[in-house]
Image (tube, rainbow, N blue to C red):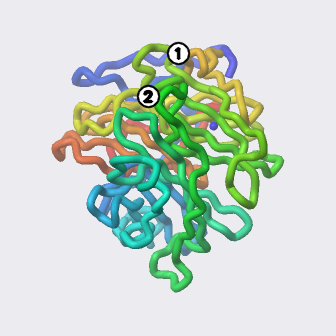
Amino acid sequence: MSRRRAVVGVLAVVAIVAGVALAVLRPWEASTEPEPLALDGDLATHDPALVVGDEGEPWFVYSTGAPGKSRGAPLVHRSDDGGTTWEAVGTAWSSDEDPQWVRDSIEGVEHYWAPELVEHDGTWYLYYSASTFGSNTSAIGLATGSTLDPDDPDYGWTHEGAVWRSQSGDPYNAIDPGVITDTDGSPWLFFGSFWDGIHVLPLEWPSGMPADGAEPVQVASRGDGVNQIEAPYVVERDGWYYLFASWGKCCSGASSTYSIHVGRSRDVSGPFVDAEGVDMADGGGTLVLGSRDAMIGPGGQSVSDGYLGYHFYDGDNSGAHRLAIQRLGWDDGWPVATTAVP
């Protein structure tokens, strides 16, 4: 959320800086410059779900929970100055509100991963992952609420249960939800990690649950035994659906190898092809953002109102995970991001 085309100007050179590939690799010069934000405050987030507020309204980031804090409920950060300064404002729910269905069906869950936030008809839908590392006995859960702000007196989440599950032996892993409402008003769930890659599943409003008879369809894969692709996120722009995905290894501090790649399609369910015309189901994916200098392993991305939110591992701070946000640039129908460390 791309066909082979003529190269505009001189082909970009693949540069190596301190042994790490340049974060932007594209065969054209950007005609619309991206705008990175210089962030401050509490930036300890992983897999951020970014929601850009209207003018004068707060911005929010919900992110992967911390083990031992409210039983791993998603963390909540807020910015009151247009996305520049961030404050940790709690967790999505308390320990007493932990979804019991997860504890009854998936052993060993310490924290909830990679939340997703979608608003429909005045209701917020909070999707999240319940799993353990290296296992595809997993589930995507859903909670609904009326506001994202823990300070709002109406704040609170109602657990709606499991949206989709995977078990050992399934060809996919039911984690990392990314939801888009298409131009016809229908919602779609993109999900997946390793195994057979990224899949798409039609949902329905207002339940936010799978449509009748829905079955997952593969849309992206690395095509090898390790198959390191996950964290799908789809956005619509100018009649194209752009599928962003993270390649490589996350969650390993300065040893992480995440990078953000993209393909596009005229149809929300694919096929998604990259700038060279390669289907993402066959290993395609144009690099948007990768490691450079102290910014290691950017990924776990989401997009809100033209801003790309992601985490990276800070090489100047022992590989600690940090939030980064920048307005995407666009060139000839493709997203462009900067290499600057926020």
Tell me, yes or no, if residue 36 can be seen here.
no
Residue at left offset 72%, top offset 42%: 202
Residue located at (67% from left, 47% from top): 180
Q: Residues within 10 Å of mark 2 (few under 14, many from 20)?
A: many
- Mark-to-mark CA distance, 2 and 1: 27 Å
Res. 215 image quadrant: top right
Query: Which label is found at residue 247?
Result: 2
- Up-down: is 51 above or below 258? below
Against 185, residue 291 (above or below) is: above
- Residue at the disc numbered 1: 10
Whether pointer 2 and pointer 1 mark residues with C-beta atoms closer than 8 Å, the reply is no
Farthest residue to the front: give it: 104
Q: Is residue 119 visible?
A: yes
Q: Considering only vertical position in the picture, is 170 above or below 307?
A: above
Query: Residue 282: x percent and y percent?
Result: 58, 15
Circle 1: residue type: Val
Place residue 285 in its image quadrant.
top right
Instruction: Label 1, secondary structure: give it.
Output: loop
